[in-house]
Amino acid sequence: MIVASASSEVLAVHGGPPVRKTLLPYGRQSIDESDIQAVVETLRSDWLTTGPKVAEFEEAMAAWVGAKYAVSFSSGTAALHAAAFAAGLQPGDEAITSPLTFAATANCVLYQGATPVFADVAEDTLNLDPEQAASQITTHTKAILPVDYAGHPADLDSILQLAELHGLIVIEDACHALGGEYRGRRVGSVAHMTVFSFHPVKHLTTGEGGMVTTDNATYAETLRRFRNHGISSDARQRQNAGQWHYEMVLLGFNYRLTDIACALGLQQMKKLEANLERRRQIAARYGDEFRDLPGVRPPLTRPDVNPAWHLYPIRLDLHRLSAGRGEVFKALRAENIGVNVHYIPVHRHPYYRDHFGYEGGEYPVAETAYECLISLPIFHGMSDGDIDDVVRALNKVLAHFER
Ligand SMILES: Cc1ncc(COP(=O)(O)O)c(C=O)c1O
């Protein structure tokens, strides 16, 4: 436990010595020799794209999350687009999602010409509030896209019940939540379709990459076609069958993940459980350190979940501080702590304001949270010394700004 520093310590932002000499990022990949070897082996193989590693990675991921099917994509965004397509979203349809997310969650609805409709988040987890979602359902609603914010699984049973009642499809944006558990089940095995991202700051990386898991064979087939121009077979299947003939049966894209990326993903999977364990240790340490620290509210974990801790978003208690979020943020950055903010609520981006006429104030819980959110560094490669630095810096900065 690191004891709060004296408020007389001069902040780096005011010219004092920073807690660290180099910037600690908020998230970062870990790549070791075994990852490099796996990629090099694939570079020397016959297949660079859609070869044996793709199928192997998909099978491994489906088995690990406990789903029947997994379909890989070139990014989490491409995977979301494909899931929106497989759900049948089209012009005239609406899909309900959280405003407190990365824009891609809502954008995938727009890609299909449908309309994203936001519903406010629950105050404790900042995940989509099922009651708010229920209040936004109309005869046009076709899907709900809960987001597992920061890696804390959404209120999936309530959302699935709502979906069943109204005949909706649930696409869970689990880009933060690979390895998260909901009521004893791994994320990826609960919703109708679950979307993951393998961006470098995530629990495992393929550089860019994404995946959809599902138990539904029709969705899986549509997802596979959609990522390959809408063609009903891939080049390797045709080569193995000695055939050249193929048919394009729907309008798809080239959203394929390469064999090179999947080789990296397979190797990274071997470290996934250890990575999750390390993230949980870091979150537990932060929780212990910040529980009683004035001016800060650490993220809460509901008793029925085990979060995957992609992010560690604290909320500042601005009533107890003489500075706003912006000043605290700047002060932490000056201490070389690479804090970040997740997220500007999607409806407050100029594109959404201009196209949908949002003025601000529509989703008060998300908007109030946004004003005081700061994400602290959390990634599996963090050392104990890195964690100490974050704890020291937050203590130092908050001691200075405490009222
Ligand atoms: C909640 C959420 N959804 C979707 C995405 C998009 O994933 P990708 O960057 O792999 O396209 C991200 C990316 O970080 C995300 O955080």
Image: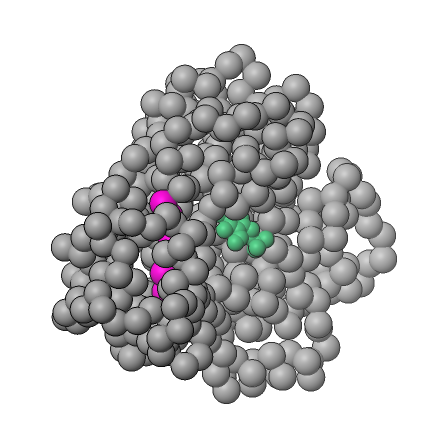
Residue 374 colored in magenta in the image = yes
- Above or below for 363 versus 259: above
* 267, 366: nearer the viewer: 366
Q: How many marks?
A: 0
**Which residue, as the protein is rendered here, is positioned at the far top?**
139
Q: How is the image coloured?
A: one colour
Is any part of residue 158 visible from this angle?
Answer: yes
**Which residue, as the protein is rendered here, is positioned at the far right?**
244
Q: Position of residue 18 (x, y in %)?
A: 37, 76
Residue 314 colored in magenta in the image = no
Q: Position of residue 330 (x, y in %)?
A: 43, 60
* 275, 401: nearer the viewer: 401
- Above or below for 198 versus 69: below
Residue sitting at x 21%, y 50%: 403
Is any part of residue 217 visible from this angle?
Answer: no
- Above or below for 326 versus 376: above
Residue sitting at x 18%, y 53%: 294
Q: Quadrant of residue 350?
A: top right
Q: Position of residue 247 (x, y in %)?
A: 81, 45
**121 sits to left or right of 184:** right
**35 sits to left or right of 11:** right
Q: Position of residue 382 (x, y in %)?
A: 36, 74
* 299, 70: nearer the viewer: 299
* 238, 202: nearer the viewer: 202
Residue sitting at x 25%, y 42%: 319
Residue sitting at x 58%, y 44%: 104
Magenta-colored span = 372-379
In the picture, the quarter occupied by the N terminus is bottom left
